[in-house]
Structures are given as structure tokens and as C-alpha cells.
Amino acid sequence: MRHIPAESLVPSDKIRDYLLAQEHKSFLRFLTCGSVDDGKSTLIGRLLSDTKQIFEDQLAALERDSRKHGTTGEDIDFALLVDGLEAEREQGITIDVAYRFFATSKRKFIVADTPGHEQYTRNMATGASTADLAIVLVDARQGVLRQTRRHSIIASLLGIRHVVVAVNKIDLVDFDQQAFDRIAESYQAFAASLGFKTITPIPMSARFGDNVTSPSSRMEWYSGQTLIEHLEDVVVDDAVNDLPFRFPVQYVNRPNLDFRGFAGTIASGSVTRGEEIVVAKSGKAARVRRIVAHGGDLESAVAGQAVTLVLDEEVEVSRGNMLVAPTARPEVADQLAANIVWFDEQALLPGRSYILKTETDQVSAVVTDLKYRLDVNDFSQEAARSLAMNEVGVCNISLRAPIAFDPFAENRSTGAFILIDRITNTTVGAGMITHALRRAANIHWQSLDVGKRARSDMKNQRPAVFWFTGLSGSGKSTIANLLERKLYANGRHTYILDGDNVRHGLNRDLGFTDADRVENIRRVAEVAKLMADAGLIVIVSFISPFRAERRMARELMEGKEFVEVFVDTPFEECARRDPKGLYARALKGEIKNFTGVDSPYEAPESPEIHLKTLGRSAEEMVEAVEQWLTERDNAENQYDYGGGI
């Protein structure tokens, strides 16, 4: 073992003093964003290098990688420090969000390097969601571009209030002051209505280090701070501890009969032992008996601390609820307005059901109204029926159950959410709640004396919704009509909802775009639910091409009332039959948005009844449905009618 001289050891008190000094440094989270190839990764690499955050072996590896993947000739390519994916290095772009920590003598930092390509906008939103400041890079040769504006709008919507406009690659325009002034004025004019508290333009060359950590001798006309000086000195509002107490419950901890605590991380505010709190959704009050943390009990806790709260009362609290301050409660509603940034290639469609997920809660949600889309060029409001990928809009949202929240402008932690596709389980959008819709608090469910069970008993039948789906010309209406005749002849109380017939009245205002198709099915599903509540056997015959809407209809019904019937007829056979001449016209391009031709049909994956029609008559199809119905009735000895008499 090599002997280490005692005089070379650092005294323990110096180590302790150093660690204590680090703990008391202020902390800043920021991100770099902007259009593609504006030098975001290079800037972060330069910051890490100039603040001595790169070890010798990392520098040696960077020099090797620069020769292999670099884009700066013989110079070190600092972008490779954060572009860690092989695809990023090969293409010279950023794809994923890269987080890096560094510190100076004045402050500690976490920086998020976000991609500039439009298709990776979701990653930029991820980086911005926790940032206090945004460095918006602008290529001095290109000026303010569309993606620069989009990223700035998203940063504003996500609550960022401090912006640095880094006019990069100033060396490529010979350090021209006029070029810098034009870009600074252009950006400030565009961003004037975005609500930023500070906008600080800085001319720089990330590649050569001009005005990054040290003043540039080649820009004597610039007398402002360098980037690192501004990052060290900028005053960011860190008032999360001054906000009302919010404690989203993540887990109910019950290891034994003598302990019941609610675990989570304090989102805002503070709590003290003995203090009164309230359960957000129920309004039940209790006092904090213990604050349990790693290492022992605490007298108090503040935002950011992970603790378990033990109350002095047995109140009902589960994951998704919040413990809050009694004098400053959050809103609880099932109707709300929000700004939404859309990420998915499949457009957002009003009427389609998604999963809305907050910090700890999740609930089924439907965008009931897309009020307008924001134009990223001039921030104007445009009428829209859908939101495409990377577009930003303002929407009204209806939830299956109430959630507790604060407006995003008041509390970023409890006012944000994501939208998840119900079929693919992918994140398709991010939202910021602006306010609850007042009608949500004024409308209550009216209790009725006569319920579904009484109506069904009077008819001596169990209600059901047979949902026939398939291509146009597959035989849905023929089979549905014959089924109703047979059920009626057997004394059953029925009603048939046919796609064409409904469009003559209830849905006469709808066309055949994807958005209109979604709304078409939403309305019909609600009508079918009311008819099932009346005790009827409802037969729905609609193409209903999207799985998401059929699933939404299923979830509206109780128990096993919803019966999906897939009328499976190949496209070629439907086109051959063409009873209304629609296929011929659609294939000629005379009809747009025709299912199976230029609009998709998503076949059911596991329908209750699968009718393969080739070589079989309509009577045989109906017999199969009747047999299924008889087997169901025989198998179910009891039926839950959902309350009432």
C-alpha cells in the first residue's frame, strides 16, 4: 500500500467547511433551447469546460471523439460532452434531454440541454417543466426562427419568467453589433406579450468562449455581463416555501395496526407538528401529530422534503388526494380550462377520451372544446378543430371525477398535467391548468326515485348495448335490423341507433373529419347510455372506426352492458357490394375521409362477438348473437342495476 504523507491530507475541518459552504449556495435550474443547430450543446460543453467540471480522462476522450464525430475541424467539439447518444453524434443533433450539474464559487446549477428539432418538442417541454430560466439560443446568421418562437411560447406557458437571448456564432458575422441589435430588438418585440420578467440579450461565441465565462476582447462595443456572471447574479423568485401548503399523497403507509401515515413530497409551503390541515377533496380536517422523515421525527418540514404525515384523526385519504392548508385550499372540480402542448403524430381530437395524470392523481378526461390554437409566429388566436403535433392550444376539459389543483400560474407543481393515450399508453400532450369552469361547481347529479332496476324489471329483461362496428357495406345495418325484429318478436324492448339515421337529426351538424367522427360517437354513446338506463336493449350500428371512441363508449356503460360486435367483412368484399355507390366515388377521389380508403379503420382486438360474414347469411349472424345473449342470461343469475327501486 502506498504511503500518503500526513502533510498532504486535507484536514477534516476544511472538508466540513467546504461542504457547509456548498449547502448554503443558491441553486438555479435552467435550460438551453432554440432552433436546431444554434449551438445549445456546444454552449453547455463550454460552460462545463470553463468552470473546470471536466476531468482529464473526460477531456482526453472528448479530444478522441472530436476527431471522429466532431464538426469543428481541429478544435474540440464541446457539444459531444452532452450529446451522448450515438445517433446524436452521427447526426450532429440533440435528441434526448441531457442534464448536467456544475457549480461556481457563487452558485450551483443544473442545466438541461434540450433538442431543437420540431419532432422532439416534447423533450424540450420536459426540460422546461422544472427550469427557472431559459437560455434561448439564436444563430447570429439566421435570426429569430419559427422554432425559436415555439420554444419561447412553451417556456412562457410552463412558468419560466427569466430569459437569456444568447445570440450565438457572433464570430461568423464578424462580431457585428448591428446584427446583434437587430436580433435582440426582434426577439423583444415578439416576446413582449409572453409575460417574461427579464429578457437579457448577450452576444457570444460558444465555440471560442467569447462572453461565455470571460469578456470578449473582440466585442468592445458590448459592456454587459458575461453569461456566467448573469447566471450567478440573476434573482429568481424562489417563493415555493411561501405558497400555501400542498402535500400530494403518494402512498398510504400502514405497516402495522399502530401506524397509519401518508407519504409524499411537499409540493409547496410548509407544515409544523400540531398544525391543522384539510383533506382537499372531502374537506375533512385533522391535525398533524407526527412528521416522520429518514432519521427521525421533525418539528416542521418545507417544500421539497419527502416525509410521512401522521394525523390525529382517522380521515379517509388515498393516493391522488392532497393534504392542504385550511385557509388556502385548492380548487376541486371536474371541468377545467387549460393550455395544452400537443406531442403526438395523431392529432388531438375534441370528444376523444384520454387519461389525465397530475403529480399523483389520474382520471379519464375528454377535451370538450378546443377554443383556439396559438400561432407561434405572432401569438395570435386561430380557430381550430384539432391540434397537430407541436401545436399549442387552449381547451376546455371534462373529467370523469373531480381532481384537486391550483391554477398553474399560482403553483407549477399542482397545476400541471400530462395526457396519455388510452390505447398506446404514450404521453401525447402536456397541460397547464388556467382555471376551473364555474359550471363545474354549480351542477350536481339529481337523485331520482325510479332507477334502472325498476325500469328493467317492468320490462322483464336486462339492459344491454350491442355495439355493431365494421366497414361501410359490411352488413351491420342488415344484421342489426334483423336482430331487432327477432328480439321484438320475442317480447324484448329494443331500440336501434343507426349511423345514417342519427345524422339526419342529432348529428346533422357533423361531417366526416376525424374530429367530427369522434364527436359523432361520443353523442351516440351518451344516448345509448340513457336508453340502457331506461331498461332497453340498445342496438347501435355505426362504423365507429377508432378504438379509443369504442372504449370510451364501453366505459360509459355499467358492468357488462356493453357488447362489442365486430362485423368482419374484408375491404374487397365491401367495395364489391358497394350498396350506396360510395366506394366507387371514394376510390375516384370524389369523397374525402372515407373509412377504409383515405381514413383508417381500427379493427376490434377482443370483441365479445366476432361475426365473420363471408359465406354466411344475415340469419346465421343473428342466430350467433342470440346464442351469445342466451348464454349470458343463463350465466348471470344476479344483475346489478346500479341503484334505484
Image (tube, rainbow, N blue to C red):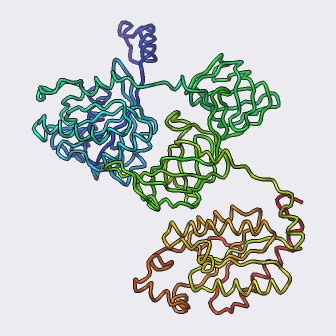
Q: In the image, residue 87 lies at what x, y percent?
A: 34, 52
Q: In the image, residue 154 lies at what x, y percent?
A: 40, 44
Q: Please indicate whether residue 609 sits to the left or right of residue 246 in the image.
A: right
Q: Please indicate whether residue 280 sits to the left or right of residue 159 in the image.
A: right
- Give the quarter of the image for residue 84: top left
Q: Please indicate whether residue 606 sits to the left or right of residue 43 in the image.
A: right
- Of residues 538 and 164, the one nearer the viewer is 538
From the viewer's perspective, is residue 89 above or below residue 585? above
From the viewer's perspective, is residue 230 above or below residue 445? above
Q: In the image, residue 380 lies at what x, y percent?
A: 36, 50
From the viewer's perspective, is residue 426 above or below residue 492? above
Looking at the rendered structure, the number of numbered marks drawn on it comes to 0
Q: Quadrant of the C terminus?
A: bottom right
- Give the quarter of the image for residue 366: bottom right
Q: In the image, residue 102 lies at what x, y percent?
A: 36, 27
Viewer can see residue 88: no
Q: Quadrant of the N terminus?
A: top left
Which residue is rendered at x = 82% and y = 73% of the image?
632
